[in-house]
Amino acid sequence: MILAAFFKSVAQMGDRRFRRVLFLGVALTIALLVGFYALFLTIMNDAVDGSLSLPIIGEVTWLGDLLGWGSLFLMLFLSVFLMVPVASAITSLFLDEIASAVEDKHYPSLPPVKPTPIYEVIKDTLNFLGILIGANLLAFVLYMMLPIAAIFIFWALNGFLLGREYFQIAAMRRLGREGAKQARKENFGMIWLAGCLMALPLTVPLVNLFIPILGAATFTHLFHSTQRARSYG
C-alpha cells in the first residue's frame, strides 16, 4: 500500500498542475532550508563572539560563508537535520493544493472540500513545529547515550511525528479534526511505517528537497486507501 501510493505520486510528476506545485514546494523548501541555516549560523556566531572555526571549512562568518562553497557543503550536511522542520512547514502550506491535484486525477468522483481556514493552518503548524523541535531536542540525550543507534532513533522518532502530521492534515480535509484523529488511531502502524520511509530519504542531501511534496501526495493516497479498505470491511 505504501509503495504503491508513493509510486502513484512520482508518476503524477508529469501532471502540469502537480509539477507546478512541486517546483514551488522545492523552491520554498530551499528558501526555508537557507533561512534555518542562516539562523543556525547567527546563533553559533553570537555564541563565539561573531566567528566560528570549523574543521576543513575554517572560519564561518555569517554572510560571507552563507554564500561560499564551504558553507554550501555545511548546509548540505545540516540539511539532514534541518529538513525535518522544513518538511513539517511545507505540508501545512501545500497539502491542500497537492491533495486537490491528486484527488482530481485519481479520485474524481469525490465531492469538493472547503479549504482549511488559514488561521487553523498556522495554529496547527506552529503547534506541531513546537512538538517536533522539542522532541528532537530531547532525543539528543539518547543520541549521546546511544550513538550507534542515533540514526535509527532519528528515523523512528521523526517518522512517527511526520507521519502523524501528514496523515492528520490529509484526513482533516475529508473527515474533520475528530474524524481524522480516529482514522489516525485506526491506522497507527501503517502511518508510522510510512513516516519512517519518508524520514529516511529526508536525511539524503538534495534528494530530500523533493520529499515534502511527494510525501504530501503519498499520504493523500494512503488516506483514501484506508477509507476504501474501511468501507469494504
Image (cartoon, rainbow, N blue to C red):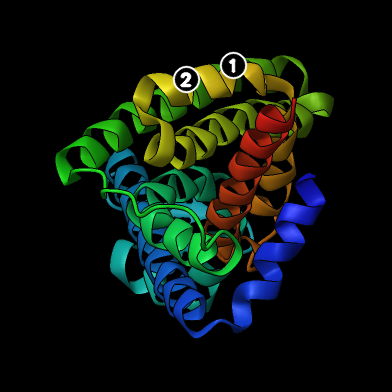
Q: Who is closer to the viewer here, 80 or 176?
A: 176
The x and y percentages for residue 198 are 68, 46
Quarter of the image holding residue 63? Answer: bottom left
18 lies left or right of 193: left
Which residue is painted at 56% across and 44% down in the image? Answer: 81
**How many labels sit on residues?**
2
The C terminus sits in image quarter: top right
Visible residue check, residue 191: no
| Residue kind at label 2, given as amino acid type | Lys
Residue labelled with disc 1 = 185
Depicted 132 relative to depicted 203: above or below:
above
Return the residue found at the far right.
Answer: 148
Q: Secondary structure at mark 2?
A: helix
Q: Are marks 1 and 2 in contact (CB under 8 Å)?
A: yes
- Distance from disc 1 to disc 2, alpha carbons, whole Å, reads 6 Å
| 93 relative to 123, above or below | below
* Crowdedness near tag 2: few (<14), some (14–19) or many (≥20) residues, C-alpha within 10 Å: some
| Residue occupying the point 80% across, 44% down | 1
The reply to whether residue 141 is in sight is: yes
- x then y, percent, for residue 200: 73, 46
Mark carried by residue 181: 2
Of residue 208 and residue 220, the one placed in the foreground of this image is 220
Q: Residue 216, position in %: x, y?
A: 53, 52
Point 63% across, 68% down: residue: 206
